[in-house]
Image (tube, helix red, strand yellow):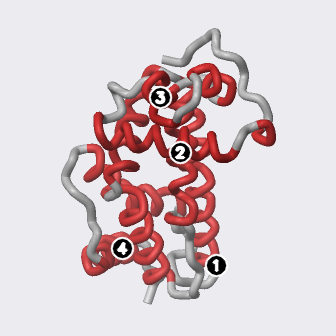
């Protein structure tokens, strides 16, 4: 739960970058070792070699620390290419997402725990959507709209529905501990199944 008495986060320019990096790395290392739930701000501070006060000066909660660590890890792992070939761009981007984030034990365990934490922390839930997922969804939407304008998918295709159909299986597997689609051929099968539903008329 967020510490209601924790001070507001000051501008990022006041942070020591080395301390910030140590704190973010410590949060992911601890999540990998113990799972998200048992990790505390005190443990992160001890692992990073900083004071608990330092963490609360920059973040309101453990979840906020982990969220920033995940956001850092997502760059550039989830960047969206634009080669002109929508199918291959999706396979490349989704493959980078899986390899760089979902199958990384540090990141995967932190993400699963953070998602669970958002169910009783509305502030954290907004941060997850606005800071972590939102910008990546916007990138995917722009790429799909460009493909729609180029006639690569149906003119009435809903890009948001396409995104849900493409990426939901990845997170389903992560959240239910079913492994990940790491092989490019497996990803192509998924992409092909979805794109066939949105193929333009012959």
Q: Gap in Å between the C-alphas at discs 4 and 2?
A: 29 Å
In the image, is 153 to the left or to the right of 30?
A: right
Residue 149's disc number: 1
Which is more toward the observer, 61 or 130? Answer: 61
**Residue lying farthest to the front in this orientation:** 49
Which is more toward the observer, 137 or 33? Answer: 33
Q: Gap in Å between the C-alphas at discs 3 and 4?
A: 44 Å
Which is more toward the observer, 164 or 149? Answer: 164
Mark 2 or mark 1, which is nearer the start of the sequence? 2
Q: Residue at label 3?
A: 46
Give the label, 3 or 4, closer to the camera.
3
Mark 4 or mark 3, which is nearer the start of the sequence? 3
- For image coordinates 40% across by 59% down, the residue present is 167
Residue 191's disc number: 4
Mark 1 or mark 4, which is nearer the start of the sequence? 1
Mark 3 or mark 1, which is nearer the start of the sequence? 3
Q: Residue at label 2?
A: 69
Mark 2 or mark 4, which is nearer the start of the sequence? 2
**Circle 4: is it few (<14), some (14-19), or many (20+) Cα within 10 Å?**
many
In the rendered image, the vertical position of residue 21 relative to residue 66, given as above or below: below
**Circle 3: is it few (<14), some (14-19), or many (20+) Cα within 10 Å?**
some
In the rendered image, the vertical position of residue 43 relative to residue 93, given as above or below: above
CB atoms of marks 4 and 1 within 8 Å: no
């Amino acid at each position: 739960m967020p510490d209601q008495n924790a001070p507001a986060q000051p501008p990022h320019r006041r942070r020591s970058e080395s301390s910030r990096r140590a704190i973010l790395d410590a949060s992911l290392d601890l999540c990998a070792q113990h799972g998200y739930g048992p990790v505390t701000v005190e443990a992160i501070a001890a692992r990073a070699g900083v004071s608990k006060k330092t963490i609360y000066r920059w973040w309101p909660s453990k979840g906020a620390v982990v969220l920033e660590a995940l956001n850092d890890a997502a760059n550039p792992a989830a960047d969206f290419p634009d080669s002109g070939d929508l199918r291959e761009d999706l396979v490349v981007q989704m493959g980078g997402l899986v390899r760089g984030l979902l199958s990384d034990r540090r990141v995967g365990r932190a993400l699963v725990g953070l998602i669970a934490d958002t169910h009783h922390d509305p502030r954290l839930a907004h941060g997850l959507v606005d800071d972590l997922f939102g910008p990546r969804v916007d990138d995917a939407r722009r790429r799909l709209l460009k493909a729609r304008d180029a006639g690569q998918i149906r003119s009435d295709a809903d890009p948001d529905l396409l995104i849900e159909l493409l990426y939901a299986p990845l997170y389903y597997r992560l959240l239910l501990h079913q492994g990940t689609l790491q092989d490019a051929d497996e990803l192509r099968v998924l992409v092909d199944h979805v794109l066939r539903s949105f193929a333009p008329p012959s």
